[in-house]
Image (tube, helix red, strand yellow):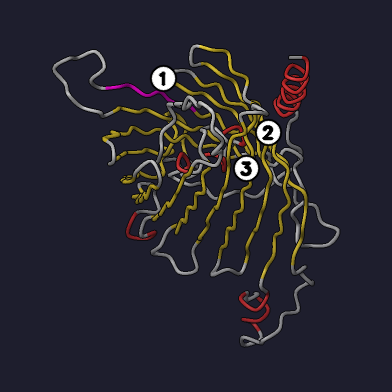
């Protein structure tokens, strides 16, 4: 019990540090995924090992597919739960590329979450994440202004740009889980690392804060006339990254083995710099799968001033599989969590 309290206090202190430490001069933005619930360890390490089964999940996003040299990104995550240690463990690999791969960021991180079970279906999971990242640029895919002036010369007279920069990147988070709801908070780029490609120039990554949660309701739970295994799920995710913030709100109809969802991305209040309402996209999600595997797809319709005809929308594909990693002969009570799948 003493070790339990000691580990819980240590992780709680780390989470508290994340709450009170504010970003300094910072810049840069991370790609945002519509189906973040399908690979939740990408937004909060507290999701690591949230179920008894080991999980391997991959997600791919083609951002604004109608624009040349757009943005692509993917995450691959693996996590599992250890009952003896009351802990979840995970590893996350991600890569994001812009401009046909000219500028790319690669990241790998190790995750740890401690499961403090309060009984009656309630638990709290503080977590930490430590990782490394590399930001690089392919100079052969860039064209500078002086090259155009000098009739598309092969080389540029601009100052030298570093080929790559590697740095440590930390994150922390916490997740409160109830019988029918969940609420989490996380902060990424906790140490605001310097991601600049110019030697001697500082370009700090802004801390990315996320508040996310939702609830699940059994549609036929209180109605004996309804014979269905369907659930209705509401979820949200508010993120603030440096000077920019965004709210995702969605609803799912989870009719096993199918799931369909509708998401809206924007802010209820506020305006863009052009003076219009702060809205971004309307997203449609469909998923299918069993307890051993799931496949999901989403399409984002751009509703901002850019317009769908300009961006072509955004596509995401998710593939996940799960299996029982602890095969010892002992009684195991499955841990049910209300979190949405896609």
Point out the image quarter for the C terminus.
top left
Q: Marks 1/3: CA distance? A: 24 Å
Q: Earlier in the sequence, mark 1 or mark 3?
A: 3
Res. 12 image quadrant: top right
Q: Position of residue 279 (x, y in %)?
A: 41, 40
Residue 177 on the magenta segment: no
Position of residue 8 in the picture relative to residue 321 (left or right): right
Residues marked 2 and 1 touching at CB (< 8 Å): no
Q: Which residue is mark 3?
A: 90
Query: Residue visible at 42% across and 26% down?
Result: 338
Dot 3 falls on a residue whose secondary structure is: strand
Q: Residue furthest front?
A: 329
Q: Position of residue 105 (x, y in %)?
A: 64, 58
Residue that appears at 71% across and 54% down = 133
Q: Nearer the viewer, mark 2 or mark 1?
A: 1
Q: Is residue 218 above or below residue 206?
A: above
How dense is the environment of label 2, judged by Cα within 10 Å: few (below 14), some, or many (20 and up)? many
> Relative to 306, is 258 above or below?
above
Q: Main secondary structure of the magenta part?
A: strand
Residue under pointer 1 = 180
- The image quadrant that residue 148 belongs to is bottom right
Would you say 256 lies left or right of 189 here?
left
Q: Is residue 44 left or right of residue 250?
A: right
| Residues in magenta, as a range | 213-218
Q: Considering the numbered disc 2 on the image, is that residue within a helix, a strand or a loop? A: strand
As drawn, the label of residue 172 is 2
- CA neighbours of label 3 inside 10 A, class few (<14), some (14 to 19), many (20+): many
Between discs 2 and 1, the one toward the N terminus: 2
* Foreground pick, 93 / 324: 324
Residue 328 vertical placement versus 175 (above, below): below
Give the number of the mark in front: 1 or 3: 3
Q: Residue at x 44, y 18 (%)?
A: 179
């Amino acid at each position: 019990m003493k070790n339990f309290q000691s580990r819980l206090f240590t992780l709680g202190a780390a989470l508290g540090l994340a709450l009170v430490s504010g970003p300094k001069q910072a810049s840069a933005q991370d790609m945002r995924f519509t189906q973040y619930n399908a690979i939740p360890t990408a937004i909060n390490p507290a999701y690591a090992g949230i179920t008894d089964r080991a999980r391997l999940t991959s997600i791919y996003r083609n951002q604004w597919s109608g624009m040349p040299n757009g943005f692509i990104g993917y995450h691959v995550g693996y996590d599992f739960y250890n009952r003896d240690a009351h802990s979840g463990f995970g590893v996350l690999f991600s890569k994001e590329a812009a401009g046909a791969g000219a500028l790319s960021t690669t990241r790998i991180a190790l995750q740890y979450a401690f499961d403090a079970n309060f009984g009656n279906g309630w638990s709290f999971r503080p977590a930490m994440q430590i990782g490394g990242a590399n930001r690089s640029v392919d100079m052969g895919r860039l064209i500078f202004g002086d090259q155009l002036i000098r009739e598309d010369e092969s080389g540029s007279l601009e100052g030298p740009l570093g080929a790559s920069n590697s740095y440590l990147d930390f994150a922390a988070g916490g997740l409160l889980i109830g019988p029918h709801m969940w609420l989490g908070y996380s902060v990424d780029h906790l140490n605001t690392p310097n991601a600049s490609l110019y030697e001697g120039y500082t370009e700090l990554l802004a801390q990315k804060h996320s508040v996310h949660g939702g609830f699940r309701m059994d549609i036929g739970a209180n109605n004996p006339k309804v014979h269905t295994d369907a659930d209705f799920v509401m979820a949200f995710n508010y993120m603030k990254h440096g000077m920019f913030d965004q709210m995702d709100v969605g609803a799912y109809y989870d009719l096993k083995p199918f799931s369909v969802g509708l998401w809206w991305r924007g802010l209820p209040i506020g305006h863009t710099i052009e003076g219009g309402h702060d809205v971004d996209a309307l997203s449609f999600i469909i998923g299918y799968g069993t307890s051993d595997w799931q496949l999901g797809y989403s399409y984002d319709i751009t509703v901002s001033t850019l317009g769908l005809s300009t961006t072509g929308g955004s596509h995401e594909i998710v593939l996940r599989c799960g299996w029982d990693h602890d095969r010892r002969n002992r009684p195991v009570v499955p841990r049910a969590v209300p979190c949405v799948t896609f």
